[in-house]
Image (cartoon, rainbow, N blue to C red):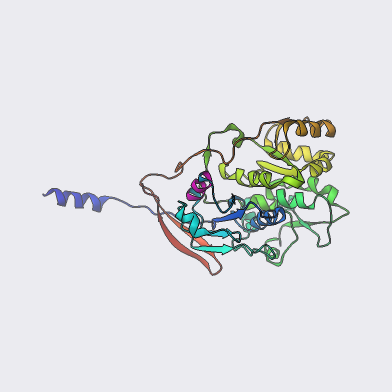
Amino acid sequence: MTNLSAELMDMEESKTYIYSRPRNTRIAFLIDEKTPVEAIRRIMCENYRIWGGSYNPIVPLANGLMEKQWMEILEVIDPDVVYYSSGIDIIALIDAGLRIFPRETREIGYECSLNIQGVNPLTFIDHYFKNQLSERRHVHMPYFSADLEHPLKNALSLNFGMREKCMRDESYLQEISHQMIHDQNIHQVLSLMWSSTRFVQNLLCEAYIENEILQGDDWQLRHFELIIYDEQDSFQDLIYFWNRRLYQVPSMRYQQLAFSKEEFELLFSDNFFHGLISDHAGQDKIWVSSRSLNTNELEELLNKCGEAKFGVSYKVVPKMDFPAQFTQDAYLVENHWQKTVMQEKRGIYPNWRCLCR
């Protein structure tokens, strides 16, 4: 028997396994440093409406230029769709060394809805009650009433994904209670969330996502962090708050929350605020950081607010360099093929991707 025949026999006896499962559409947002903060907040809140949205990076550019570290992050995440601010030249970024191959690019129109396409996160509610149907009555999805005007409305949207109910939610809420939040009961909203905390919509959107998680070595990335910012200088704090998730394995728990100084002072007097934070942090000592307030300003704010409830204490930590260094290709497995599927308006379609190195 020739060596070639022996090799052919070995090939015939080998087995190949293919695993197929749907995945979320990965989207990246490239924004100019002059992008209004209101527009950044809206990008974040609209991402909460789709499966995997909370892991879609928002990358800042200065004068149309992207830092090398952000380029490396985008290459690992490998976005399917890229949204970009007016004035950003995608071709110039690729010429400068950005190696991404999205199937679609779209310019961001800040004057109207982004209309981001994806799977509604409420799709995954049933999974968590599959064997616990009686527990459904303990879930109360909070929604804003159309006429709600309150100083905490932006904070509740940014951190917890609260919004007004839309038509496409109705079919998912038939067996799930929902609570309308208005001026008269907004003071009870944290109590409501504490009892149903794992089923707030922006936590559901990280269920079963198929994103590469960046492996950073900085200890600060692995701990819950409360971010407090100056409302007049919040750009860097919001970018840090949002993209910090890229280094965190989805856990269906909040791992960072961000509030302005004024919002934090309003919330501090609510006992349920401290209980909610302590539950998600998994400890009573809460780390506090800021990129717009210095250490002395944070300490003064905490002293002004007084003693927290439930034994919770707050400790100011220095701001870390961000984006942080990470180990590239940490989650790619050698000699492994994976079939992925992406979501489109017409349904799902296959996309073969080799993860073999």
Number of marks present in the image shown: 0
Q: Is residue 132 visible?
A: no
Q: Is residue 279 magenta?
A: no
- Choose between 19 and 285: the one closer to the eye: 285
Q: Position of residue 17 (x, y in %)?
A: 37, 52
Is residue 74 located in the magenta-colored stretch of the structure? yes
Q: Which residues are magenta?
A: 69-75
Q: Quadrant of residue 315?
A: top right
Instruction: Identify which residue is drawn at 65% across, 35% down.
Output: 319
Q: Nearer the viewer, residue 303 or 98?
A: 98
Left or right: residue 79 versus residue 335 is: right
What x and y, as percent, mark residue 95? 45, 55
Residue occupying the far right of the picture? 184
Between 136 and 351, the one lying in front of the other is 351
Q: Main secondary structure of the magenta part?
A: helix
Q: Position of residue 325 (x, y in %)?
A: 52, 38
Asked if residue 30 is positioned above or below residue 166 in the image, the reply reads above
Asked which quadrant contains residue 38, the reply is bottom right
Residue 288 visible in this rendered orientation of the protein:
yes
Residue at horizontal 61 percent and vertical 43 percent from the top:
244
Residue 277 picture quarter: top right
Up/down of 285 relative to 67, above or below: above
Point out the residue furthest to the front here: 63
Instruction: Tell me what residue is drawn at x 73 percent, y 52 percent.
Output: 157
Residue farthest along the bottom direction in this orientation: 346
Can you give x and y, in whole percent of width and height, for residue 302 in the image? Answer: 79, 33
